[in-house]
Image: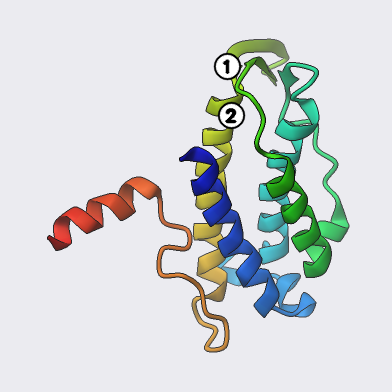
């Protein structure tokens, strides 16, 4: 179920990227403090890449990201990166450690692959909600009504409709 939800969410992002020009993708959005759709997309991609690239090592540090400018400026390259994530995401669950430096202190927290996949899914949805702010005024871009909406909110809305 987790992989299916991630796949659905990343496919929504792929669909958006197929509709937007590189110019619009990398255009600063006033409502997002001049961040771009590309910057938010890059952040989503690189968080998944961190998890995938550091899986074998067993220590995941999301602060060690490439911050690849091409991902945030080129929709075709961003799509390729997402497709690569989708092709690599199914791995056995295993224990991992999450590493982060907080206030100069090295922190290691026990976690596992599935927990980090769930974190990345929620993180992705959060950034898609921000992306939605940038594209909502567009009359040409069509996105799923649940783009950027938490799975729990979607389920809650279904219950309310009954």
Judge from the rendering whether residue 37 lies leftward or rightward of residue 23; answer left or right: left
Q: Measure the C-alpha gap from mark 2 to mark 1.
A: 7 Å
Answer whether labels 2 and 1 touch (C-beta < 8 Å). yes
Q: Whole-percent x and y of residue 72?
A: 78, 60
Q: Which residue occupies 15% across, 57% down?
A: 160
Helix, strand or loop at mark 1: strand
Does 54 sit above or below residue 42? above
Q: Which residue occupies 72% across, 63% down?
A: 38
Q: Whole-percent x and y of residue 127?
A: 56, 53
Q: Nearer the viewer, residue 159 or 36?
A: 159
Judge from the rendering whether residue 23 lies leftward or rightward of residue 110; answer left or right: right
Query: Mark 2 — residue?
Result: 116
Q: Nearer the viewer, residue 20 or 23?
A: 20
Quadrant of the image for the C terminus?
Answer: bottom left
Q: Which residue occupies 66% across, 65% down?
A: 37
Q: Nearer the viewer, residue 90 or 146?
A: 90
Residue 123 appears in the rendering = yes
Residue 33 appears in the rendering = no
Q: Which residue occupies 56% across, 63% down?
A: 12
Helix, strand or loop at mark 2: helix
Q: Whole-percent x and y of residue 130?
A: 53, 59
Judge from the rendering whether residue 55 lies leftward or rightward of residue 117; answer left or right: right
Q: Please identify the residue farthest to the bottom as the structure is shown.
A: 139
Query: Mark 1 — residue?
Result: 111
């Amino acid at each position: 179920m987790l992989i299916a939800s991630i796949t659905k969410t990343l496919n929504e992002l792929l669909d958006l990227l197929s509709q937007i020009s590189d110019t619009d993708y990398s255009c600063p959005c006033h409502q997002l403090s001049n961040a771009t759709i590309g910057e938010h997309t890059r952040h989503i991609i690189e968080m998944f890449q961190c998890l995938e690239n550091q899986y074998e090592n067993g220590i995941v540090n999301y602060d060690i990201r490439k911050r690849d400018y091409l991902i945030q400026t080129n929709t075709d390259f961003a799509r390729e990166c997402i497709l690569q994530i989708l092709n690599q995401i199914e791995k056995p669950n295993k224990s991992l450690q999450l590493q982060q430096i907080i206030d100069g202190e090295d922190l290691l927290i026990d976690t596992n692959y599935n927990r980090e996949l769930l974190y990345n899914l929620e993180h992705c949805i959060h950034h898609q909600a921000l992306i939605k702010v940038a594209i909502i005024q567009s009359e040409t871009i069509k996105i799923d009504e649940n783009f950027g909406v938490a799975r729990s909110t979607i389920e809650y809305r279904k219950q309310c409709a009954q």
